[in-house]
Amino acid sequence: MLLLSAALFAGVVAVSATGFGRAVPDPAYAFLQEQPYAAGEPVTWRPCEPIRYEVNPAHASGSDDEAVARVQDAVAEVAEASGFRFRYVGTTARRPADADQLAPGPAPPVLVAWARADEVEDLAGEVAGIGGSVSREQDRWSWYVTGRVVLDADAVDDADDERATLLHELGHVLGLDHVDSRRELMHAQSAGQEDFGPGDLEGLARLGKGTQACS
């Protein structure tokens, strides 16, 4: 059974599966971070700005174009479920370690990449992927500004597993935490679920609720 994990970014405001995790029962969803000055409100992305992302297809199965297309398909599903807009900005040579630190200035795009445990220690064992985002505070409100998804190039070699792992980790990028319900794709372990469950969809919709006010 593969584990699906949220990433921990060193040296920055971080999100992980150990976030405040306020789960809502039936359907179940939980958020990785809570607003520091607004109890119960999740940290999320700015609703009226596209979430930029780039892909490093090294170590992925198939051609570079095929790897990018698979990521774009998964992003499209998450965009539809959440209401967020995403903007693909191209391929990159940037590696997961380059996304560990958030320097001052404009934040880089979300990175989607494939790696092995000898490069990314969090992929050791039966971990299929890691994902998460980092936030910045402005005017007493926190927003996610960048993030990463890293798939284990050795553990994820089936198309269906890769798609489910991409969706799960992108859920972390948007702000979803793990839940106990096996009906949800955001369960910490792969239990044969390949699509977002009812709780996942409700959580994603809540994270993206501000998008309804965007023209």
Image (cartoon, rainbow, N blue to C red):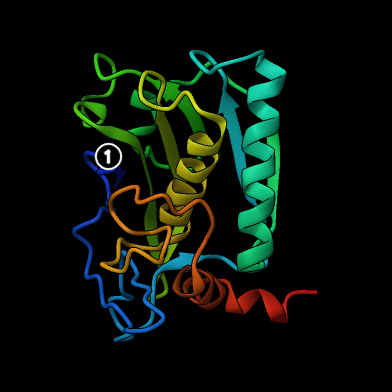
Identify the element where label 1 is drawn. loop
Judge whether 77 appears above or below 117 on screen: below
Up the image or down, 157 lies above or below 2; here it is above
Q: Is residue 138 left or right of residue 108?
A: left
**Please, is residue 3 above or below residue 55 in the view?**
below
Tally of marks? 1
Where, by quadrant of the figure, is residue 148 drawn? top left
* Figure quadrant of the N terminus: top left
On the image, the x and y values in percent for residue 33 come to: 30, 67
Quadrant of the snapshot with the C terminus: bottom right
Q: Is residue 202 visible?
A: yes
Q: Which residue appears at 39% of the width and 20% of the height?
A: 115
Q: Position of residue 96 (x, y in %)?
A: 38, 26
- Residue at 33% across, 83% down: 24
The residue that appears at 42% across and 30% down in the rendered structure is: 151
The three-letter code of the residue at mark 1 reads: Met
Q: Residues within 10 Å of mark 1 (few under 14, many from 20)?
A: few
- The residue at 52%/14% (across/down) is 58
Residue carrying label 1: 1
Nearest the viewer among 108 and 55 is: 55
Q: Nearer the viewer, residue 11 or 180?
A: 180
Seen in the image, is 184 located left or right of residue 7?
right
The outermost residue toward the right is 215
